[in-house]
Image (cartoon, rainbow, N blue to C red):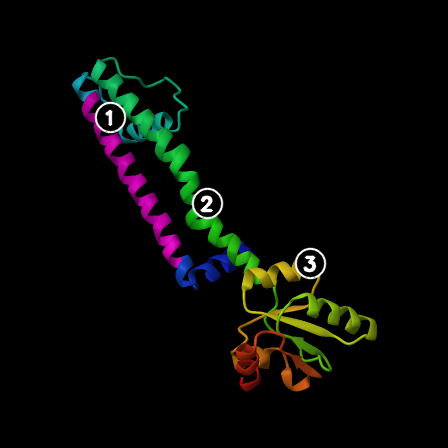
């Protein structure tokens, strides 16, 4: 429960995630309106056939038909009622069995999964870290340097501004820190004051920006 609350708090704190969540909630609201309309029409057609049912029975019938369960304990006798049942059934197949799963994945699960990936890579080093080297880009040169540093027992961390890429490096077992290369907060979180060096291995303009930062 605590995990679910923490993840929802993270999602609600992101602008894009809030927009996606609003889209999913809007679809659920639309679905609720459709179910309510079908429930009302159920009562109208049942009264036309001279039969009365409770509102709960109407909702029960609507949900069982839309979900294709169709227990058969409540049925229409007229052609109009049976035609309405077909409309409700087809609407349920589209709205509940096709659109709803895709909407859930698109507006809720995919943003949640992306948040999980971003959360994997650390954003700050502990106070015990010192004498390390900060590497500003993971490339073949950095790989060779890291092999040498590993043999020498010198700690190092790769700075990666792209959160999914940082998470991928983290999953590969590469010491990585997620943060923008032109943000002073990134280097403060990387304990640049306690580092041996900063290895700027990008283009000249980016390296100059890193140096000035």
Q: Nearer the viewer, mark 3 or mark 2?
A: 3
Q: Which residue is mark 2?
A: 105
Residue 7 on the magenta span? no
Residue 19 on the magenta span? yes
The total number of labels drawn is 3
Q: Which disc is residue 172 wearing? A: 3
- Residue 192 pos. (x, y %): 63, 83
Image quarter where the C terminus lies is: bottom right
- Whole-number angstrom distance, CA of label 3 to CA of label 1: 57 Å
Given residues 36 and 145, the one toward you in this image is: 145
In which image quadrant can residue 124 be found? Answer: bottom right
**Residue 105 visible in image:** yes
**Left or right: where 173 falls relative to 137:** right
For label 1, the SS is helix
In the rendered structure, which disc, 1 or 2, sits on the residue that comes first in sequence?
Answer: 1
- Residue 102 pos. (x, y %): 43, 41
- Residue 199 pos. (x, y %): 66, 78
The residue positioned 31% from the left and 31% from the top of the image is 59
Q: Are marks 3 and 2 in contact (CB under 8 Å)?
A: no
- Whole-number angstrom distance, CA of label 3 to CA of label 2: 27 Å
- Residue 197 pos. (x, y %): 68, 83
- Whole-number angstrom distance, CA of label 1 to CA of label 2: 31 Å
Q: Residue furthest front?
A: 204
Q: In the image, which residues are magenta? A: 18-45
Q: Residues within 10 Å of mark 3 (few under 14, many from 20)?
A: few
For label 3, the SS is loop
Above or below, 165 against 184 in this view is: above
């Amino acid at each position: 429960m605590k995990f679910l609350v923490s993840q929802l708090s993270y999602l609600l704190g992101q602008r894009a995630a809030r927009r996606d969540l609003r889209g999913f909630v809007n679809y659920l609201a639309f679905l609720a309106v459709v179910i309510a309309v079908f429930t009302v029409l159920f009562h109208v057609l049942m009264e036309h056939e001279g039969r009365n049912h409770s509102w709960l029975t109407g909702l029960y019938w609507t949900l069982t038909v839309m979900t294709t369960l169709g227990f058969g304990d409540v049925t229409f006798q007229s052609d109009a009622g049976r035609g309405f049942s077909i409309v409700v059934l087809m609407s349920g197949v589209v709205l509940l069995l096709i659109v709803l799963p895709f909407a859930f994945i698109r507006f809720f699960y995919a943003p949640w999964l992306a948040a999980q990936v971003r959360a994997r890579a650390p954003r700050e080093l502990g106070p015990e870290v010192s004498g390390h080297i900060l590497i500003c880009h993971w490339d073949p040169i950095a790989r060779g340097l890291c092999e040498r540093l590993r043999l020498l027992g010198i700690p190092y961390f790769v700075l990666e501004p792209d959160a999914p890429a940082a998470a991928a490096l983290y999953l590969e077992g590469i010491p990585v820190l997620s943060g923008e290369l032109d943000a002073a907060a990134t280097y403060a979180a990387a304990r640049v004051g306690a580092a041996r060096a900063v290895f700027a291995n990008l283009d000249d303009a980016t390296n100059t920006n890193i140096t000035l930062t």
